[in-house]
Amino acid sequence: MAVCIAVIAKENYPLYIRSTPTENELKFHYMVHTSLDVVDEKISAMGKALVDQRELYLGLLYPTEDYKVYGYVTNSKVKFVMVVDSSNTALRDNEIRSMFRKLHNSYTDVMCNPFYNPGDRIQSSRAFDNMATSMMMQVC
Amino acid sequence: AAGPVADLFRASQLPAETLHQITELCGAKRVGYFGATQFYIALKLIAAAQSGLPVRIESVKCELPLPRFMMSKNDGEIRFGNPAELHGTKVQIPYLTTEKNSFKRMDDEDKQQETQSPTMSPLASPPSSPPHYQRVPLSHGYSKLRSSAEQIHAAPYEARQPLVQPEGSSSGGPGTKPLRHQASLIRSFSVERELQDNSSYPDEPWRITEEQREYYVNQFRSLQPDPSSFISGSVAKNFFTKSKLSIPELSYIWELSDADCDGALTLPEFCAAFHLIVARKNGYPLPEGLPPTLQPEYLQAAFPKPKWDCQLFDSYSESLPANQQPRDLNRMEKTSVKDMADLPVPTQDVTSDDKQALKSTINEALSKDVSEDPATSKDSNSLKARPRSRSYSSTSIEEAMKRGEDPPTPPPRPQKTHSRASSLDLNKVFQPSVPATKSGLLPPPPALPPRPCPSQSEQVSEAELLPQLSRAPSQAAESSPAKKDVPYSQPPSKPIRRKFRPENQATENQEPSTASSGPASAATVKPHPTVQKQSSKQKKAIQTAIRKNKEANAVLARLNSELQQQLKEVHQERIALENQLEQLRPVTVL
């Protein structure tokens, strides 16, 4: 149901970006990029509180006319950003949360692979790819 | 007839008309392709034709000598197995009613047989490697079949080295590939019939044979003595990297084989990974999903706790020791394997069982067959595994470490990395024990070049100004990056330092000497009793050595204490500086 899924590293460079191919992908890249500011803002807003108390799911980062952008941050400051079609009103918060949870799980699986160097682009993991495309294809 | 099959048929040297007849009879024309059934029937008819019998369906039912094919392209001294023995089994041919998928695979594989001969390298002809790899439709219990099949299975290009003939078989008959190939067909049939219970998995190259299993378990043990615990990710990574496969491939193999995604490999996972690597080295493309025969549950069920005296092994014992060619394994530097006996494993793939040794082009058939099968089974596996693994992956790293620690700890070998994330405590636990033994002998750390910002040096003017001072402040300077003081110039202070040095050394000589004499004497007490047991000459040599060591110890101990002192002082300076900084800061900010 997402139209774009992105994994951003702690240093704010993308580890993985996938969007539905029909759209103008650059637009999504740009949206993800701008959403990073919002993510940072949300993180620092919790600021003083301890990291564990901060919830991983950030919720709706910002809505645009056509799309909504949701965010999720892990404890290692790896961010997941998901762009969802606004017309998809049936999509509830819980579903978004579960999608992020799946993303997070897949991400940890990729991490577990000793041949993956943290900080590399996530290119070789087919499982991760499959999972991401499955989330996007649900649009149809 | 279709391409490769046509070649084969033509090689049988039958008139074209007969071949047409045969093709028609076997039903290939009807169905439009050479399915396995058709192919077998066709071969049988060819045999019939070659023996002069009329080409009829009924002739299929007779006992016939094997069809002969004159192929020019067989390389390899394929010492062919005794045809006489094969004859004995060909009666099984009429039993053509075996599983469909096995048919299809064999068929494809047969077609590949024709094309594979010219190619030598495994990479160039992935289809060919499966036949060699998997050619032998062996079963565990049928030693006779196996022994003859051993010979058959000599892969053309791999069989450069002569096969050792197992007992009971006379030296090879006509070494034509197709004949051998067909013999293996026959064999596979017969074996299939008898062994249908043994496996329900059609994917042969992914089945681990007994020797392979032994080999893998040996390797596992070399990495991790306890077969029931894990190999950590980094250990496995180093090990598998030696196989010289590319990192993305290794990464993919890992993804396939680490079923529970915990970053560590249990024995079945390790075997699966190893097997995939071996297969890849032999030129097999990697499957889309983990084949069912490589699933951990299957592996664990099929091969319960590895025993070095595996009962299953005796069925192999006579035939297998014959084939010891470290072919592909040599390419993999993993052959730290000293004993050749283990090597045949990956290359020969004496794949047990039943079915098709004749694996078709892995690509098509395998992925087709396997993809739907493991796709579901993997999913179910992953589903099963997930709940368990979730708890590990979602919780902290300590959990993973604990899991790594739960299995009995291995013998003295310092397992620095139980789990991937054990950079934390385990390392610290083990490391102190290791260097502690060597501390006395470590030379003093090399003098670091004096850094330009030991600002403390001015203040430390009175201090222990040994050259080590430059080291200590530099370290302190590094550790307190908050310092913004202008680095005091070092050179002017140097002469001061040097002046003080002898004083300090003099003073400190006394302190540490007393301190060091204590430990030194303690250290030297030990060697003394041992000295007494030596001869006099040795005694003297040893005593001089002891004396030297004592002196070295004393020096080191002194150095140590001096450094400690310097460290203390530097700390104090640092604190002082930080205080200053704090005082200064509000001024600058505003």
Image (cartoon, coloured by chain):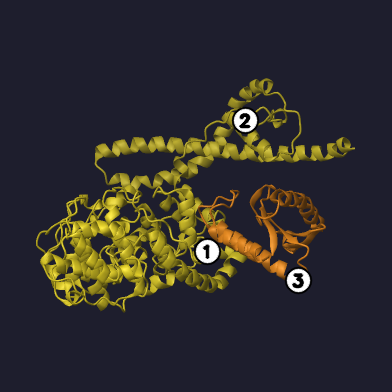
Subunit bearing disc 1? B
What hue represents chain B? yellow
Mark 2 Cα shell of 10 Å, populated few (<14), some (14-19), many (≥20): many
Nearest to viewer (mark 2 / mark 3): 3
* Quadrant into which the N terminus of chain B falls: bottom left
Tint of chain A: orange
- Split into 4 quadrants, where in the image is the C terminus of chain B? top right
Name the amino acid, label 3: Ala
1 or 2: mark nearer the eye? 1
Q: Which image quadrant for residue B93? A: bottom left
Subunit ID for the residue under disc 2: B
Left or right of B40? Residue B384 is right
- Residue B36 spot, x, y in % from top left: 30, 69
Q: CA distance from mark 1 to mark 3?
A: 33 Å
Residue corresponding to mark 3? A90
Residue type, numbered disc 1: Cys
Same subunit under labels 2 and 3? Answer: no
- Location of mark 2 (residue): B470
Q: Which image quadrant for residue B110? A: bottom left
Q: Earlier in the sequence, mark 1 or mark 2?
A: 1
Label 3 lies in what chain? A
Q: Nearer the viewer, residue B82 or B22?
A: B22
Mark 3: secondary structure: loop
